[in-house]
Image: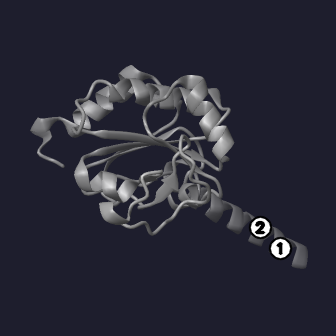
Amino acid sequence: MIGAIGLLLVVVISVAFLTSHGAGTAGIPAGQHLRMFAAPLATSTLQGDANLNPPCTPARHDPRALNVCLMAKQTPVVLAFFVTNSGGCERAVTALQTVSREFPAGQVQFAAVAVRASHAAAASAVRRHHWTVPVAYDRDGAVGAAYGIEICPIFELAYRGGVVARRLIGEHWDYATALAGQVRSAFAPASGAG
């Protein structure tokens, strides 16, 4: 009897976990606000973990960090989450880099975050792929946890102000043509958003 109750409990917990933590829950859904953070840039000398309560004023911002709050105050944002040493995930950042060149400076900002990556691993990926978009690293995984990152790549497309317009999940979006179409349609001037 005790064994049957234990088995039933395991099944119930497993079903609850899988339905609440599946791939469909990864990232921030459209209509919700981005989770604000500041994380060290891979190309900077800043070391440490991300700040999940960053200052949202330029005067208090460390330029060696990627500050999503400041970015979202200025323009729409395309934010990619990836892991280092994963071909598909790193290919997504290369696609982000390509798409970023299609937009005039100041129209949309693009950045990426290496989840659970060391400074050295993130910096190595930036050098290896010649990325010029800002790439931050999330050493302890706090940013990844705040965004529910369970798979990669994930792109968050957010209007100015930080409300998510679209969330793109999976390797389908790691090609520039597919990603560019989503960014253009989300942030086209005629959309009236942002």
Q: Which mark is residue 6?
A: 1
Q: Residue at x 56, y 24 (%)?
A: 129
Colour convention of the picture: one colour
Q: Secondary structure at mark 1?
A: helix
Q: Is residue 48 above or below residue 5?
A: above
Q: Which residue of the protein is positioned furthest toward the bottom in this rendering?
A: 2
Closest to the observer, 174 or 136: 136
Residue 147 visible to an observer of this rendering: yes
**Image quarter (top left, top right, bottom left or bottom right) of the N terminus:** bottom right
Residue 193: image location, x then y, percent: 16, 48
Q: Is residue 93 above or below residue 82?
A: above
Q: Secondary structure at mark 2?
A: helix
Amino acid at the residue labelled 1: Gly
- Location of mark 2 (residue): 10
Residue 6: image location, x then y, percent: 83, 73
Closest to the observer, 31 or 53: 53
Closest to the observer, 25 or 49: 49
Q: Quadrant of residue 33?
A: bottom left
> What is the CA distance from the residue labelled 1 to the residue labelled 2?
6 Å
83 on left or right of 28: right
Amino acid at the residue labelled 2: Val
Residue 133: image location, x then y, percent: 42, 34
1 and 2 marks in contact (CB < 8 Å): yes
Q: Residue at x 53, y 45 (%)?
A: 44
Q: Local crowd at mark 2 within 10 Å, few (<14), some, or many (≥20)?
A: few
Residue 1 visible to an observer of this rendering: no
Residue 183: image location, x then y, percent: 30, 34
Q: Residue at x 75, y 72 (%)?
A: 9
175 on left or right of 101: right
Q: Residue at x 54, y 60 (%)?
A: 50
Q: Local crowd at mark 1 within 10 Å, few (<14), some, or many (≥20)?
A: few
Q: Is residue 180 above or below residue 26?
A: above
